[in-house]
Amino acid sequence: MADNSAQAAPALKEIFNRARLRHIATQAAAVSPGFDVERFMRLATDDLGALGIMQRMRQTAVSLHATLPADFPQAAEILCALAPRIEHNFASIALCEHVALYGQGHFAVSMDALKFLTRFGSAEFAIRPFLARDFDGTLAVMRGWAEDGDEHVRRLASEGSRPRLPWSSNLKNLMADPSPTAPILETLKRDASLYVRKSVANHLNDISKDNPDWALDRVSGWDLSDRNTAWIVKHALRSLIKRGEPRALGLVGATGKPELRVEAFSVEPANVALGDRITISAAIASTGLGSQHLVADYAIHYVKKNGTASRKVFKLRELTLQPAGRTTLAISQTIRDFTTRKHHAGRHRVELIVNGETLAEDAFDLGI
């Protein structure tokens, strides 16, 4: 049975609750004497309960505009003084949003402000309107950011120029031709910061969805003996690896078509309710004459509202199997709803996938 004893986590939108908005207002007054705290609160909390997180973030930015000086360079200076005082990274994104909304006519000031503000709350969303308005000029600035000494600024160069940045608009010109961001990726391909490397990998993964050959050609020329570069490539190619793309599998060391015997594969329990946990397990044995490097994944075919299924692939394990070698694979997963996935009753097929090949299937039945 599902365990409903744990208290639900606060909704993400509560990042911008009344207490946080009051904190922003009092800190704004501290750095800008004369800031109208109560006017800001009236504007920022208007119909607050009906707003989602991104709507609250934007309303906060708009409310700051109404209560800060009308002169944008002066307002930007106050925002930069305010940022270190907010003490919550996502809440600080509202300051970047203010720049995106009201700084379009002050390009140089806005670029300097976003470069500073991104240290406190990523400016990845705020840079997008500038790319839409002046792609070449903005990207030229971002190429310089890729060489900055601060990891937050370097990450912004990559994250802000991702073709398919989540929670933001797609950059359709980069989806069609990703080459303008190649200098950024080349600069960051061996970055020492994991924070930056994750962004570079996600950027390349975005590219692989629209231009898989371009992504593969690019990383094929990289020095994979550098462990930072190898980390990026492994994570960048995850979508292609899950699809069984041979070149991608080869780049992460997989040894081609698996020579295996599946001795057991099961999903337990066979009948579950929402909130229950399933365990997927397999026993495999090598039938090959040589050592095999294997990338094992599993796929769940989620039943949709209309009765059809949507296949999603998950990482299971990477391993090396010697001739006549045997091993077991196992993983557990809770069946629960997310904002991006709602479950529906029915039979859910589960596949065992090794080096891109489906080797076994089982299923579980979900009752809602």
Image (cartoon, rainbow, N blue to C red):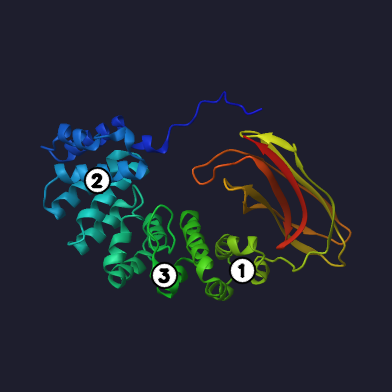
Select label 1 or label 3 by which is in front. Answer: 3
Residue 36 placement (x, y as % from top left): 13, 35
Kindly identify the residue that appears in the image at 17 percent across and 33 percent down.
37
Report the front residue among 343 and 3.
343
Circle 1 packing at 10 Å, graded few (<14), some (14-19), many (20+), is few
The amino acid beneath tag 1 is Ser
Q: Is there any visible trace of residue 178 in the rendered image?
A: no
Q: Position of residue 22 (x, y in %)?
A: 25, 32
Could you say which quadrant of the image residue 366 lies in? top right
* Element assignment for label 1: loop
Residue at image mark 2: 61
Going by the numbered disc 3, the residue's amino acid type is: Leu
Which residue is nearer to you in this view: 200 or 163? 163
Which one is earlier in the sequence, the residue at label 1 or at label 3?
Answer: 3
Identify the element where label 2 is drawn: helix
Q: Quick check: 127 left or right of 214?
A: left
Quick check: can you spot residue 206?
Answer: yes
Check disc 1 and report the residue beneath it: 225
Q: Tell me the distance, in whole angstroms, between the alpha carbons under discs 2 and 1.
A: 45 Å
Height in image: 226 above or below 3? below
Q: Identify residue for label 3.
A: 174
Cα distance in 3D space between marks 3 and 2: 28 Å
Q: Residue furthest top?
A: 5
Look at label 2 and name its amino acid: Ala
Which residue is at a point 35% across and 55% down the rendered structure image? 125
Residue 368 in the image, given as x and y percentages of width and height = 62, 34
Judge the density around disc 3: few (<14), some (14-19), many (≥20) Cα neighbours within 10 Å: some
The answer to whether marks 2 and 1 mark residues whose Cβ atoms lie closer than 8 Å is: no
Residue 267 sits above or below residue 152 on the image: above
Say which label, 2 or 1, has the lower sequence index. Answer: 2
Image position of 196 with respect to 283: above or below:
below
